[in-house]
Structure formats: C-alpha cells, structure tokens
Image (spheres, helix red, strand yellow):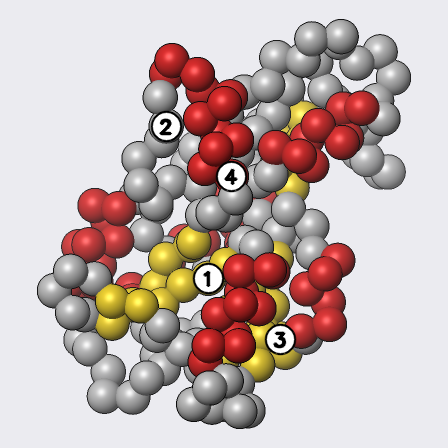
C-alpha cells in the first residue's frame, strides 16, 4: 500500500494549516452514512517527514524494536522532527497531504496499530510507503486540554486523537444547504471560534 502520489512538499504552508472540519447535523461518520470519513477529512492537512523521493521516514520504534512512522496533525511537532531527521539527511523535507487520503489505511486504535505493525515486513531502508507502519500522532499539547474537558470521565487511551465541539456552535459555510457543527483538533481553536460567534453561551459546554 502506498500513498507517495498524495504527498506534496510544502514546508511554508505548515503555519497556515487548518485543524478542524464541519459535519452536517444530519450526517454520520459510520459506514453507509451520508458522508464518509474520507470525505470529511479531505480538507484536514497532516504532515510527514520525507526523503527527496517523497517516501516518509520511519522515525520511531515499538517495544519490540520494530520501526514505525508518524503523520502529524501539529506542524510544530512535524517541524521539530524534521530538524532531527536533517541531522543525517539534509535533503529531508516536510510534506503535507490530506488526512482523508490516508485515513482508511491508517490504524484507528492502539490495538489495531499493533496488529498492523506485526503484519507488515520491516523495510531495510529508513523510509517506507507501507502505511501499516504508520499512525496518526496526537497533538501532544492537547493532553492536558482533553483531560480538562473530560473531567471525571478520564483521559482517552494512549494514541487516541481527541476531537472537540460545543453543542450550540453551528456554522453555515458558503454553499451549504444546512448548518454544520464544526469539530476541532485543538481546544484553543474551538474556544477562539466560539468567542467570535453571535449568541455564544456564557458558560460553554465543551465536549471531546
């Protein structure tokens, strides 16, 4: 399985990356729903550290020593990893691709990630286009935020990527036939959007 074709080299665009998507209230993410996860996530950028041929680097390893790679939601974290890789490959670059383009082939839980990694052969090189070796990296700065939102419900499992929303917040994108509820990968982005919304509640009901 490869996704080399969807990788687009563009380190400069990282700073303007969006980290949210909107879902019509009548739609569903489940199979057979009105919109698929691939469609919903097509405008969400993720970042990978790649070599000059566009192959993503394997920059981590599991407890058994099997090499793994990451796609990042945070451009800051991706750029930090890029600097580490450039210590041995000065031509390494940051590539941006739509999350929807790889979503179906990435593991969606830590257990699934372990199964897929076990089934994938380890490459001899330090890069691979086999997405069974990769996972989506949660934004590290959001660990405290999601605990704040969940409260007594506790923190999500390791490797889980949280989404935030507020039930009263709806938007009407240009061309949309109905109001949509935005979901955010960063709590601060949700708070900033809600602060600009008309009729926002005095005490927001943040959820994750």
Q: Which residue is mark 4?
A: 142
Q: Tell me what residue is drawn at x 45 percent, y 20 percent.
A: 150
Q: Residues within 10 Å of mark 4 (few under 14, many from 20)?
A: some
Q: Compared to 28, does 53 lie above or below? A: below
Badge 2 element: loop
For the residue pair 50 and 147, the one nearer the viewer reads as 147
Q: Which residue is mark 2?
A: 155
Badge 1 element: strand
Q: Quadrant of residue 47?
A: bottom right
The Cα atoms of the two marked residues, 1 and 3, are separated by 13 Å
Badge 4 element: helix
Q: Residues within 10 Å of mark 3 (few under 14, many from 20)?
A: some
Residue 19 visible in the picture: yes
Question: Looking at the picture, how far across and down is residue 92, in whole percent?
Answer: 52, 85
Q: Tell me what residue is drawn at x 66 percent, y 52 percent.
A: 43
For the residue pair 173 and 56, the one nearer the viewer reads as 56
> Which callout, 1 or 2, points at the residue further toward the start of the chain?
1
Q: Which residue is mark 3?
A: 8
Q: Are marks 1 and 2 in contact (CB under 8 Å)?
A: no
Q: Which residue is mark 1?
A: 71
The Cα atoms of the two marked residues, 2 and 3, are separated by 34 Å
Q: Quadrant of residue 136?
A: bottom left
> Which callout, 1 or 3, points at the residue further toward the start of the chain?
3
Which of the two marks, 3 or 4, is nearer to us in this view?
A: 4
Question: Looking at the picture, how far across and down is residue 183, in whole percent?
Answer: 62, 33
The Cα atoms of the two marked residues, 4 and 2, are separated by 11 Å
> Which callout, 4 or 1, points at the residue further toward the start of the chain?
1
Residue 49 visible in the picture: no
Question: Looking at the picture, how far across and down is residue 81, in whole percent?
Answer: 48, 70
Q: Are marks 1 and 3 in contact (CB under 8 Å)?
A: no
């Amino acid at each position: 399985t490869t996704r080399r074709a969807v990788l687009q080299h563009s380190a400069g665009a990282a700073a303007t990356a969006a980290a949210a998507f909107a879902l019509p209230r009548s739609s569903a993410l489940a199979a057979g729903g009105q919109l698929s996860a691939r469609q919903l996530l097509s405008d969400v950028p993720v970042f990978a550290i790649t070599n000059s041929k566009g192959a993503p680097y394997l920059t981590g390893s599991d407890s058994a020593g099997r090499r793994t790679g990451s796609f990042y939601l945070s451009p800051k974290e991706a750029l930090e990893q890029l600097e580490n890789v450039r210590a041995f490959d000065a031509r390494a670059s940051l590539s941006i691709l739509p999350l929807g383009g790889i979503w179906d082939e990435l593991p969606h839980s830590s257990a699934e990630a372990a199964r897929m990694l076990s089934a994938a052969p380890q490459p001899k090189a330090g890069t691979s286009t086999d997405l069974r070796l990769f996972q989506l990296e949660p934004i590290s700065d959001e660990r405290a935020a999601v605990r704040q939102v969940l409260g007594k419900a506790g923190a999500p499992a390791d490797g889980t990527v949280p989404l935030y929303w507020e039930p009263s917040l709806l938007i009407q994108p240009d061309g949309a036939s109905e109001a949509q509820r935005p979901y955010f990968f960063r709590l601060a982005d949700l708070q900033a959007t809600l602060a600009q919304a008309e009729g926002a509640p005095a005490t927001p009901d943040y959820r994750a």
